[in-house]
Image (spheres, grey):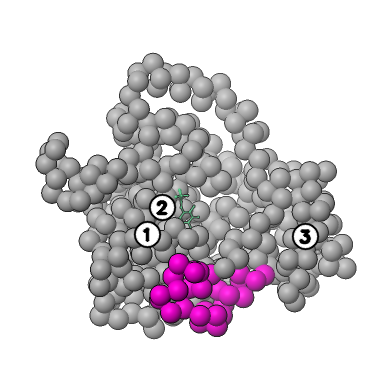
Amino acid sequence: MQVPLLDLKGQFAALKPEIMTAIEQLCDSQMFVLGAAVSKFEDEITAYCGAAGSCGVSSGSDALLLALMAEGVGAGDEVITTPFTFFATVGAIARVGAKPVFADIDPVTFNIDPAEIEKKITPKTKAIIPVHLFGQMADMDPIMELAKAHNLCVIEDAAQAIGAEYKGAKAGTFGKYGCFSFFPSKNLGGFGDGGIITTDSAESLERLKIFRNHGMNPKYYHKYIGGNFRLDALQAVVLSIKLKYLDGWHTARENNAAEYVEMFNASSAADKLILPAKADYATRHIYNQFSIQVKDGKRDMVRDALVKAGIGCDIYYPLPLHIQECFADLGGKLGDYPKAEAAAESVLALPIYPESTTEMREYVVSTIAQALA
Ligand SMILES: *Cc1c(COP(=O)(O)O)cnc(C)c1O
């Protein structure tokens, strides 16, 4: 049996007539940049998340960059974030000329630990970027309290967490900005790159929309130096259709995760693994990834066994950001963030996509149990 880590073909086949009709209509209109399709999709995301407004952008990476630019974060400023994330979180901070400052993670949720954030706040700190990793939100109450006490801007990196909930409220509604990605492998994936920023006020929304279009308002008059961060209408049309099915896909992922937990707990591998845990505060984990931890340094051996058995899996992420070559000038070294480093050495993401089957999970679990026997 072959089990891919992610297979989007089934999802597309089910929606193909609806999507192709909408694409054809858009082609007939020849309106490809921003316009009605993008505005409609922005309103839908605003309603879905329960935010004050949304600004469609070119990618999740650009969402982070644009939020920092609109906030005026730059040289001389410090931004606190997690070392255990996708590169784009930290890349955006460096690209605006600010200094990334890391705070170690909670080993259970893999998310930034608020107690560690507090230790890193200095007079230069401007913002905090918590990342809602794998589809589970960071512990937002203490993060928002710290931000309020020290007058810091919170930018949620919700690229993996659209629809995830913390105490009943959705990702992207806690910070001043919520940054989302529609990269095809996210729970809501487009037909290429795309992203969106949710905001807490009409004022920030207006600023974002100006920055997204070269800082231009009115036409050819530039108050700010923005950039081209626009969302394509083609992506908006596809995403508007897919959004209607998103909660159903989330539910399928939740069910798949519950089934994995049951199967692993009943297997001989149970005490050799740490399964993904849902925090008490997490009213919804959307399982963008189902990342197990393999104990006793056996992760790479298990990965090799899965690959050999035709099972897709991946390591998110093998090298924490503080020890990436491009950030050497920040002076980070092995040992600085032990929890992030331990996670990087033990995590392994397994197939969890909505259309994956019980038989596939049985095969994955038995292959892992055999490898660890
Ligand atoms: C995917 C991702 C991004 C970047 O999104 P793109 O749309 O690929 O640019 C940023 N942060 C995290 C945590 C991500 O997973």
* Magenta stretch contains residue 329: yes
Secondary element type, mark 2: helix
On the image, numbered disc 1 is attached to which residue?
92
Direction from residue 353 to residue 368 in the image, left or right: right
On the image, numbered disc 2 is attached to which residue?
61
Direction from residue 249 to residue 328 in the image, left or right: left
Q: Is mark 2 within 8 Å of ligand 1?
A: yes
Q: Is label 1 in contact with label 2 (beta carbons under 8 Å)? A: yes
- The residue under label 3 is which amino acid type? Asp
Query: How far apart, in angstroms, are the residues tagged by discs 3 and 2?
Result: 31 Å
Query: How far apart, in angstroms, are the residues tagged by discs 1 and 2?
Result: 7 Å
Give how far across and how far down residue 108 sits, in percent: 59, 72
- Where residue 359 sits, quadrant-wise, is top right
Write the residue at 43% across / 34% down.
Answer: 235
- 321 and 291: which one is in front? 321
- The residue under label 1 is which amino acid type? Ala
Write the residue at 82% across / 51% down.
Answer: 309
The tag earlier along the polypeptide, 3 or 1, is 1
- 173 and 41: which one is in front? 41
Direction from residue 288 to residue 214 in the image, left or right: left
- The residue under label 2 is which amino acid type? Ser
Classify 10 Å Cα crowding around label 3: few (below 14), some (14-19), many (20 and above).
Answer: few
**Magenta-highlighted residues:** 320-346
Question: Mark on residue 304?
Answer: 3
Name the residue furthest top: 28
Query: How far apart, in angstroms, are the residues tagged by discs 3 and 1?
Result: 33 Å
- 167 and 219: which one is in front? 219
Give how far across and how far down residue 58 sits, in percent: 38, 43
What kind of secondary structure does the magenta stretch mostly adopt? helix
